[in-house]
Amino acid sequence: MATTNLNVRVDENLKKRAETLFNELGMNMSTAINIYLRQAVRKQAIPFELKAPNVETLEAMEEVERMKENPELYKGYKDVEEMMKELLK
């Protein structure tokens, strides 16, 4: 099977995170992209559902970003047991 090169521009952080994930799954970026392309061709569609997040999801995503920027403003837990004790009070 003949191969060809594909050049794609992506966000640097996204690329690093994707490479980490694919490595954990035992594959490289090229294999992952080939899987995606084969599924798209096989299904004749994007191989996953595309939809805009609802308002609640957008608010939750914004909250996570605020928490990342200011972790000192939010309660943290050392383990699940500690968190559950407080939640069940």
Image (tube, rainbow, N blue to C red):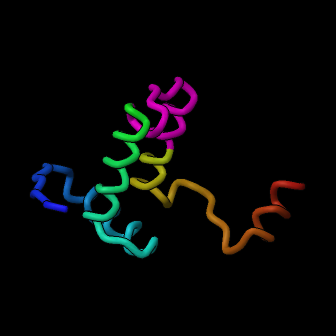
Magenta highlight on residue 89: no
- For this rendering, which residue is in front, 62 or 31? 31
- Left or right: where 59 falls relative to 81: left
63 or 26, which is in the foreground?
A: 26
Whole-percent x, y for residue 15 in the image? 25, 60
Where on the picture, by quarter, is residue 27?
A: bottom left
Image coordinates of residue 14 in percent, x first then y, are: 29, 56
Q: What residue appears at the point 71 percent right and 73 percent down from the top-left corner?
A: 79
Q: In this view, does 55 lie to the left or right of 32?
A: right
Magenta segment, which residues? Answer: 45-63
Q: Residue furthest front?
A: 1
Q: Is 16 in front, or is 71?
A: 16
Residue 21's x, y, as percent?
Answer: 41, 66
Residue 31 drawn above or below residue 44:
below
For the C terminus, which image quadrant? bottom right
Q: In which quarter of the image is the N terminus?
A: bottom left
Expressed as whole percent of the image width and height from the top left, the position of residue 67 reads 48, 51
Q: Residue at x 19, y 50 (%)?
A: 10
Q: Nearer the viewer, residue 72 or 3?
A: 3
